[in-house]
Image (cartoon, rainbow, N blue to C red):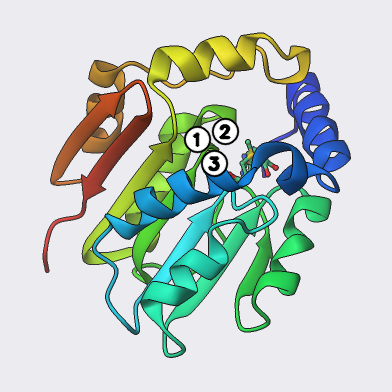
Amino acid sequence: MNTATEKDILRRQFFNEAAEEWEVRNYPPETAAKTESLIAELEIASGMTILDVGCGRGILIPMLRGRAGQRGRLVALDASAPMLAGVADKDDGAFALHARAESIPLLDEYVDMIVCFSAFPHFSDHPAAAREFHRVLKPGGTAHVLHLASREMINRHHDRHHAVAGDHMPDEKAMRAMFLAAGFASVNLREHAGEYRFSARKKEA
Ligand SMILES: C[S@@+](CC[C@H](N)C(=O)[O-])C[C@H]1O[C@@H](n2cnc3c(N)ncnc32)[C@H](O)[C@@H]1O
């Protein structure tokens, strides 16, 4: 287990304190609709097991349930307990894991898909998170790192808030190298002002 740095503690406090008002502040109807469209583009089949890493209050959970159906298994993971507490209100069938992306408490090859929405830049060890994504995905599974803004906009936005200043999305070259080094077979980035979507696919069995 890693020792938390001062920065980790500051960041965690920030998210703990922001939890109660999180959705009201960050998900007005227009943003929720854009998020829904982003999720609608993912190839989610009924019955899939999906892991939402850095799930926050679980804004994605009803969207994922709508696509994975009642037979789908949803696992929501977040390092902030007050954030994670929101998941049960959304879906009492979703499993909530209070854990870090860098150390996912699941056995190998459990999930069909990983979604990581508006969270990756906040992880303190990006390569460790990428390795964990690869480990817990089934062969042929995909990890999606998603945002509703370009990398530059995300990085600028974080730098305006002391607790998350410096929480940057690595550039394309670094993301590609990191996920390929983690074992992924292929990676793809789609990016424009209103979207960042980095997808990494694990090799088929
Ligand atoms: C900007 S919020 C986004 C939450 C949610 N995905 C959303 O869009 O509403 C980032 C989330 O990442 C979580 N987080 C930060 N570092 C983490 C880590 N190392 N492992 C897991 N979660 C982490 C925070 O607690 C927070 O809930």
Q: Closest to the observer: 178 or 83? A: 83
Q: Position of residue 179 (x, y in %)?
A: 28, 36
Which residue position is annotated with label 3?
31
Marks 3 and 2, Cα distance to the nearest angstrom?
23 Å
User: Looking at the picture, does residue 23 appear above or below residue 12?
Assistant: below
Residue that appears at 48% across and 50% down:
33
Cβ of disc 2 within 8 Å of ligand 1?
Answer: yes
- Tell me the distance, in whole angstroms, between the alpha carbons under discs 2 and 1: 6 Å
Q: Nearer the viewer, mark 1 or mark 3?
A: 3
Q: Amino acid at mark 2?
A: Phe
The three-letter amino acid code for the residue at tag 1 is: Phe
SS state under label 2: loop
Asked whether, in this view, residue 102 is left or right of residue 24, the answer is: left
Check the picture and name the quadrant holding the C terminus: bottom left
Around disc 1, counting alpha carbons within 10 Å, would you say few (fewer than 14), some (14 to 19), or many (20 or more)? many
Q: Which residue is mark 1?
A: 120
Are there few (<14), some (14-19), or many (20+) residues within 10 Å of tag 3?
A: few
| Residue depicted at x 38% and y 77% | 68
Whether tag 1 and tag 3 are in contact, CB under 8 A, the answer is no
Q: Residue under label 2, please give it.
A: 123
